Image (cartoon, coloured by chain):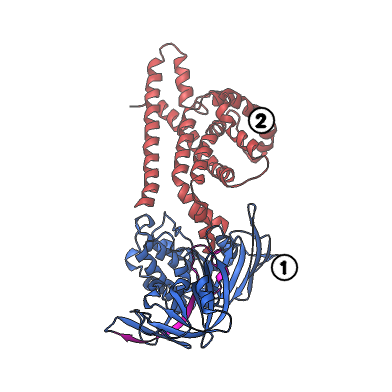
Chain colours: A blue, B red
Amino acid sequence: MLELDVALERGAFLIEARFASGAPIVALFGRSGSGKTSVVEAIAGLVRPRRGRIVVAGRALFDSAAGIDLPPEARRVGYVFQDALLFPHMSVRANLAYGEGLTPARDRFIEARRVVSLLGLESLMERRPATLSGGEKQRVAIGRALMASPRLLLMDEPLASLDAPRKAEILQYVELLRDELRLPIVYVSHAIEEVTRLADHLVILSEGRVLAEGSVAAVLAREEIVPLAGRFEAGAVLETRVSGHDEAFGLTRLAFAGGELLVANVDALVGEPVRARIRARDVALALEVPRQASFQNVLEGVVDAVGREFGGIVDVDVRLGAGERLVARVTRASAARLGLAPGVRVYALVKAIAIDRRSVGFA
Amino acid sequence: MPTADELRVVALSLKVACWGVGASLPLAIATAFVLARKRFPGKTLFDAVVHLPLVLPPVVVGFALLVLFGRQGPLGRLLEPLGLVFSFRWTGAALAAAIMGFPLMVRAIRLAIDAVDTRLESAARTLGAARARVFFTITLPLAWPGVVTGALLAFARALGEFGATITFVSNIPGETQTLPLAIYTFTQVPGGDEQALRLSVLSVLLSLAALALSERLTRRAGGARDA
């Protein structure tokens, strides 16, 4: 459980952030300069908030009212930096051992051997950081943080300096940490694909304020955060399970309470949970089931709200059978022609190919 | 081959230089760290005082030492009961050498500490290391080539120190007569040129040896980092 309520100053910039979550992975999302890094630095104790409270697993790390301000070395909060920051004068082995030796034996929850095999570091142990690739450095940095047996792991844009294949690789390791070690993680990112794939609880920061927080599906369905959150497109997230594969056509069926989606083949076993993000611009609306159309997915629902208009375009919120939400982007002209208003029964048409593979992750 | 007298002069010079550098090195590292990492009122003045021996005529430094650390000087009287006597002793020559070399040492070490990424220190702290441990395991090892360079510069300065030494502790054979003072003495007597030349050659050899040693130490530290 992480509880945070802080006000901190970075130069003339004031950051006021407040959120609480017991989720396995909390994502802090926002464009650069939104105050994400300052918030995690405050959790680690690297910057001192002007006032506020930070509590991790029931232990106050900072509480201005009670006069508590633990130094970073007493917080037991691991920190994985964007650029790894391995100690250049030590071997990988010595980097990994650095924090382990400083952790009392009774507080250690993971052995060196396990960290090494979990992150695949066996062949790197005697190397120097300067000889490692970006992805290898980041794996060692994660391992180094784990060896200090932290109660919370902060990851500040750990993928930002990596190429796409390395990103995918490290993402898998992050999921492994969450599932194997049950280590709570605060994950900072400005990339929506990483956030939809990993996060359970999403906090959106903009100009030093929390703009929205909550479950990924709920937060991403709110279209008013779209222009503020930067590189991010309006859309909805559905939590689904693989219900079957259609080998002949290379399709995967994803079931959720309110219906079923057909998507291009997803590499997952039947029964595995999958999170699908559906962009608003890939959803069209109709008043009756279209016949002889190329749309693979037709979902029945009710218009919940006709959202903000920008230019000739409007985003329409649709509530599906079991309460899931979709966002459809239609022209104002179509909205008027179809008489779209709250309560109107509609069919949401989703292209099978509209589901972005990269954002289909294990929920 | 050098004579026994010449060897005695060389040994005295080495003793003075080693003690001068060795005893002031920890203080130089501390000063460099404070100048590189801390902000406090009066820092500019402190910086200037540290660098003073670099810009003052050595004779002025020697005279100041004589006034402060002489038998009747305020610091000299304070330290005498503790068994620390500087005036007209080799210890005084070491003190003069230390003060003349101090700014060179501080400058080199400060530059090296400035070049250490403070975020590496932050990373070490999140791993459970308190400030002192971070300094000895991260900052100092990474600044090591600068420490070696600074120590060598100060050592070379100590071997060549003349003005402050002769003003403070005079030119006493076997006690304060280091290489430069001995060379100077030989140039002042008729027919002493040959001996002055022999000592000069020894002085050059000594400096070259110190340079070679520091190259080795720096390369070892640098090599450890890039290997």
Query: Which residue is depicted at the point 34% across and 68% down?
Result: A122
Which residue is outermost to the top?
B190
Amino acid type at circle 1 is Ala
Q: Which SS class for mark 2?
A: helix
Can you say whether A273 is above or below A234 in the image? Answer: below
Query: In the rendering, at what x and y percent does residue A245 appear?
Result: 32, 85
Determine whether, in the image, residue A75 is placed left or right of residue A289.
Answer: right
Task: Give the chain letter at badge 2.
Answer: B
Picture coordinates of residue A188, whole percent (x, y) = 51, 66
The residue that mark 2 highlights is B68
Q: Residue B126: x percent and y percent?
A: 53, 63
Give percent across and percent down for residue A29: 53, 66
Name the quadrant of the N terminus of chain B. Answer: top left
Q: Is residue A317 visible?
A: yes
Q: Nearer the viewer, residue B15 or A355?
A: A355
Secondary structure beneath disc 1? loop
Image position of B7 (left or right of B35): left
Q: Is residue B105 above or below residue A230?
A: above
Quarter residue A52 falls in:
bottom right
Residue A361 versus residue B185: which sits nearer the camera? A361
The residue where tag 1 is placed is A66
Q: Crowding at label 2, few (<14), some or many (≥20) Cα neighbours within 10 Å?
A: some
Which amino acid lies under the numbered mark 2 shown in the image of this protein? Answer: Leu
Q: Residue placed at 40% from the left, 24% from the top?
A: B199
Give the number of the disc on residue A230. none
Which residue, as the protein is rendered here, is positioned at the far left? A248
Residue numbers of the magenta segment: A220-246
Asked if marks 1 and 2 touch (Cβ < 8 Å), the reply is no
In the rendered image, residue A242 lying in the magenta stretch gets the answer yes
